Amino acid sequence: MQGRIFSIQRMSTEDGPGIRTTVFMKGCSLACTWCHNPESISALPQAQWIGSRCIGCRTCMEVCPHNALELTPRGMAIDRGLCEGCGRCANECPSTAMEILGEDRSLDELVGEVEKDRAYFENSGGGVTISGGEPALQTAFTASFLQACQGKNLHTALDTCGMCKPAALEQILPHANLVLFDVKFADNTLHKKFTGAPNKGILDNLLAINTFMERDNTPQQLWIRTPLIPDATATGENILNIGRFLASHLGQAFSRWELCAFNNLCRDKYTRLGQVWDFADTPLMARDELESLESVAKSSGVDPAIVFATGATRTED
Amino acid sequence: MAGSNTQLKHHPVKEPKGLSPRITWLRDYYFQGANRAWNNEFTAWSTGTPWDEIYDELTFYIVPETYAFLQTFCSSFLQAARNVPLCGEFWDLSLPERRAWFVREVVAKLLPAEILPGDLIAGGRFNIQTSLCLDQKETKVRKALVQGKKGARAQMKWFHDHGYGNAGATSGHLIPGYEDLLKRGWKGVHDDLASRLEALGPDKQDSPGACQLKAMITASTMPRDLAARYAALAREMEAKEPDSARKEELARMAQNLDHTPWHPPRDFWEAIQALWITHMLVMSDENYPGPGVSFGRIDQYLLPYWEASLAQGMDREWGKEILKCFWIHANTAYDALIRTGGNGGITAGYGQLITLSGMGADGQDLTNDLTYLLLEVIDEMSPILEPKPNVRLHANTPDALYDTIIDMIAESQGAPFLLNFDERSMAGMMREAAKAGRQDLINASNVWQYAPVGCLENTMAGNDRSGTVDINLNLLKAVEFALTGGADLVPYKDTIMGKAYPIDFGGLPTGDPTEFTVFEEFFAAFAKQTRHIIKKAMDLYETSESIRAEFSPTPYLSCLVKGCAEKALDITQGGAELSLVTIEAVTFATTVDSLLAVQYLVFDEKLCTMADLIQALKDNWEGHDILAARAKFKAPKYGRDDDKADAMARKVMDLWTEETWKHKTRSTGRQARPGMLSWNYWVGDGYILPASPDGRPKGQFLSNAICPTNGADINGPTSNANSVGKAMGGRVSGKGDYGNYLNSLPNGASHTITFNPSILADPDHREKFKAYLKGYVQNGGTALQINMLDAGMLRDAQKNPADYRHLLVRITGYNAYFTSIGKELQNEVIARLSHEGL
């Protein structure tokens, strides 16, 4: 069995408890305008060029069967219409400047990879997180992978945007110890505007997870995560409404609500993929903005002790 | 000597804190360097004979930076020397007796004695260069052996210039039996030696053994005589002292010195006083300041004195005050060359190591009140170089100790100590016991008493000289020979004069590699060449080792090392119970990656022929950009937790370590043992060794100790540590050298990892970092040096991105390789780091 991934992050400290290895699956059911992993959205392999590694040998151009590459004075121009993501360029590039995002890996190989850090997981209460993209889209693989990890006594976490078929969750949840669930907007119109999809199915899935937890005692833990995006999610009203929703519908079912401050380090990723990012010039949040949203969240009805604001903020000179 | 990563090392400006006016003054005074009125600069002392020699250059053969100055040192110390009036029978004495008498005469009678204002510990000047005390005939013989056409110096120089590395019989690098000395006092040592001499019987009183014992007896009175001198001085100063508190301190110091170190100390202050005088005289005896003369587990053996003083009502802070004076004294070792360079002679080159915490019998933890007290002293005195601390961690290290050291790491942006890992280290020592046949001296019941010396070199304490920096061998030379069938790949140059040597056929004829059809043939050639260069390194070492054994006894140090009195044999002649010498392999990862590249480029992927590759190396990769990039970026690398690549590392490790155990020194019978330290050679020798198949051009750094090559570590700190642990042997249930742990390197290996300070940003992340260290105990190597990257390093990374490909910039929720993000964003991250002091 194979899954399509675009990255593996060892010693991840931000994707659940303890030290974790996070497997990022390719393909997403949402297309959030602020997405920090733009390479995760398409399910297809994509070529990218990292200029700092390029030695200008033009090998990639010579081997490309579709004439999709052109080294220009401003860098490598990749004709996305012609490129089929076959990977010849990345294979032949001597300096790893050309990369293919999206690689099919076998289940066994991937389990072997994540097992390497068992010692660090065990000492930290960490484990494996499957993230994306949206891992639930590759339902069978995600379920089997988490099951295999649990079979090897590794703690498992599913990091999901919540936009998937309920049947997919039904298959995956029995093998997840923890779910990291994104709640971006309480308001459906805004959700649709910024993510391309309505939030009803997502919130229904969230409640379904709660039912699972009560009925089957799996997953054992639920964390909610809300990205704080300036001029999008990061408004007092939105945070208050999300908090109210969580408090009234989930009660004590979740054990952590993380407010993750916007960061702009993914700017280059968009450039490399030949895409324009709406948030390219958006600065980091100011510390008092973050703190004020944190206090809104803490007074929304959610137990303040489980509300955490994370991420770097702007420094004022 | 520390394997430091100069590219990644930035000394953060941490400030000392909580110092009393006394210590503030002493510390500030120390850092005035050459502007001080008092210092501990080398003084030179001669027998006054026209043939006299002072400077023992053999001890500097492992420091290539000094090669150009050896002759200058020889003559300038002679010129600056004062003559010592000799006792009547001097020339009738044996060499060790002459030397013992001469050093005692200088130290106890001729060197000025001073006590600095407020100082609580006596023992100021100890940096001396004393006559070798040879007669005319001995001088002539030695001179020919050292400076003759085929002498030790010429051989050493040739070896170094041809890229093999270096070797020389070097001082220090051991833990003298300080614990035992504190229990017995010097009188105990003296009386034991006297009875051994008597036991030889009346007709053997002129035998070499008797002469050695007589020399040691003379040496054993040196600390007594020196203490008496300082006691008298303290009394003189007391008489003139107007301040009553200081008067009382001086009176107490005089009393301390009346009693100890001749008699065993009775409390903490006396113990520190006795320890200091005993220690500084080792450096006098060896004529070498602080060369890895290490203290061992001071939080263990000083504990009884500490507890006794606390019981007698000593204030905890007063105990720290005494220790801080001791700290200042240790740093005056650097005064030896105080006028050299712009920094008061302070280099990172000395290593008077102290060991804290660690395992006891049956795996229990030995952290105690004194451990924490010493960590407080380190924290309050830092930044300061000596003594250098190592903290021992193991499966049962308490969380409280982790919390303390992690706080210290967080504050200093890089640990003010090295971490030593017990299980892996002890596995190495157990391997040594088996390989050297010394299970009587190292076994399951005592291996936990090991401690590191110098930087991180593991040894036993009080009976072990393992020559931990004496032989430094570039394994990469064997790759070069495998590529040429035994010749230099390119002409080497005299590193001083710049003149080219002819191509040398110093390797073995392993055949024309262009005719090899499978990689195994190449590896077999490499294996033969490896065995060959190990032998060459041992042969070179023999030249200086045999000269030292014949001409440079250290009878005072011999008093402090178990085995020397028992065998009536000087430590330089193999007197120590555990008498070994360490081959430190340099260029490990560069060698492994080079083999992997040959396999990948020539045999597996057939991207070039062997002839193409050899030509590219001869051209220093110039004009072979694509092949160079493939070698560098596409070929597999050690350090990524890639099992196939790490298997090559394991194979190379097995090969060279097993070969090392086959050797012993001929003159002194010292068993060779393996280690990986590589001090700064990986930088300097990068300019000597030609281009290597891993894509490295000549002039680029080689790999450091057991670390992956620069830029190879792209999977983060856990994979890096896993690779290191695997290379050393890993863990095998039920089949380990110690528990499940295997370790091919009894000496241990230097490992440096760089972290982003955000790993310590909050309590939650500190817990994760703690878990990482606990994971390292299980999966990693023997010793870890931690760097927390700072803005300065990131700026360097902007200028030299190729060297920093592995640097992860961690912003919450998002990780990025620093060098792969745009310049503008890099600047933003740097600005953020500088502002937040993350």
Image: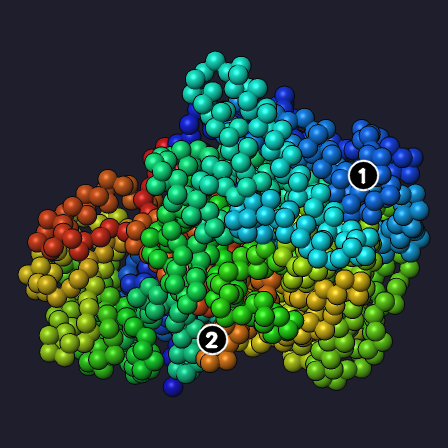
**Do marks 1 and 2 share a subunit?**
yes
Look at 23% across and 69% down and name the residue there: A179
Look at 55% across and 19% down and name the residue there: B237
Q: The disc labelled 2 sits on which kind of residue?
A: Asn
Q: CA distance from mark 1 to mark 2?
A: 51 Å
Q: Which residue is mark 1?
A: B131
Q: Position of residue A291 (x, y in %)?
A: 22, 43
Q: The disc labelled 1 sits on which kind of residue?
A: Ser
- Please tell me whether residue B112 is drawn above or below residue B735 in the rendered image: above
Q: Nearer the viewer, residue B647 or A240?
A: B647
Is residue B667 visible from the viewing direction of this image?
yes
Look at 18% across and 76% down and name the residue there: A218
Q: Nearer the viewer, residue B388 or B479?
A: B388
Which mark is drawn over residue B740? 2
Q: Position of residue B144 (x, y in %)?
A: 92, 50
Q: Position of residue B574 (x, y in %)?
A: 72, 60
Which mark is drawn over residue B816? none
